Amino acid sequence: MQRILLVEDDAAIVRALEQYLSAEGFEPIAVPGQQKAMEALQSKKIDLLLLDVSLSDGDGFAVCKDAKEFGIPVIFLTASGDENSVVQGLDLGADDYISKPFRPRELLSRIRSVLRRSGKTQSMVTLGSVTIDLDKGIVRKNGQELSLSALEYRLLTVFVNHRGKLLSRNVLLEEIWDAGGDFVNDNTLTVYIKRLREKIEDDPQKPEIIKTVRGLGYRVD
């Protein structure tokens, strides 16, 4: 499980991000200021740093400098329109920034993108005879490229990003509702899972990749 250090002194933002990141399969560690952040960087294995520029204890730029010395990627959380902070953070080696208020899904996308670019996560995933190149968006089965719709690919990456976790139909609907601009309800979700299985499973009637947990949802091991 990848560990994200969240350096933020706004309790409401911390609570929301801790819940969201945990649900997405990350291990968040939250600290309020510079001193605690420095201690965490030195004592724990951190995969990515989410860092507010303005801290009640010190400032985010000093924390960013330390994190980069440890080879840890950094995403700054900045106040909307604070261009000077953005420039200074990028000059210090920050990998990305996102302005408050932000949408959780946009932040999640940036986190995964930075982790891939920094080599902190695999860009190639294997599920049986299926390989998924997350950088290029290419899916192959037994070496042959598959033609997946935008929504089918999004559904597959949701399973990959939550590998080993049970996903209810409601969670899947929340994740893919706007993929490709298509409207997705409970019935169409069933259709898309069926279509995806027909493309990636050796025997769609006895799926070995996307498994049904009766009455609860689906899981990819």
Image: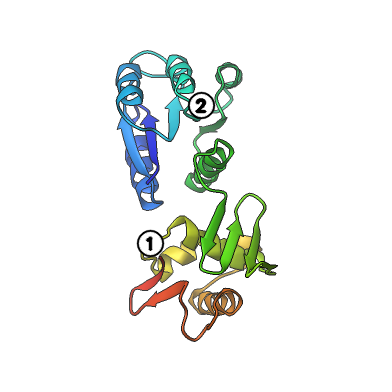
Q: Quadrant of residue 92?
A: top right
- Residue drawn 54% across and 77% down? 201
On the rendered image, what quadrant is the C terminus found in? bottom left
Taking the image as shown, residue 200 lies to the left or right of residue 38, namely right
Q: Nearer the viewer, residue 28 or 134?
A: 134
Residue to which mark 1 is pinned: 164
Check the image and report above or below for 38 versus 109: above
Bin the neighbour count of mark 2 within 10 Å (Cα to Cα): few under 14, some 14-19, many 20 and up: many
Nearer the camera: disc 2 or disc 1: 1
Element under label 2?
Answer: strand
Find residue 97 and report its horizontal and vertical position in percent. Answer: 55, 30
Q: Are marks 2 and 1 in contact (CB under 8 Å)?
A: no
Q: Amino acid at mark 2?
A: Thr
- Left or right position of 21 against 88: left
Q: Position of residue 122 (x, y in %)?
A: 52, 48
Q: CA distance from mark 2 to mark 1?
A: 34 Å
Residue 87: assigned label: none
In the image, 65 versus 127, the foreground residue is 127
Picture coordinates of residue 150, whole percent (x, y): 65, 64
Whole-percent x and y of residue 202?
55, 80
In the depicted view, which residue is nearer to us: 103 or 164?
164
Badge 1, how many Cα within 10 Å: few under 14, some, many 20+?
few
Residue kind at label 1, given as amino acid type = Gly
The numbered mark at residue 78 is 2
Q: Residue at x 61, y 76 (%)?
A: 199
Image quadrant in which you'd find residue 85: top right
Quadrant of the rendered image containing residue 106: top right
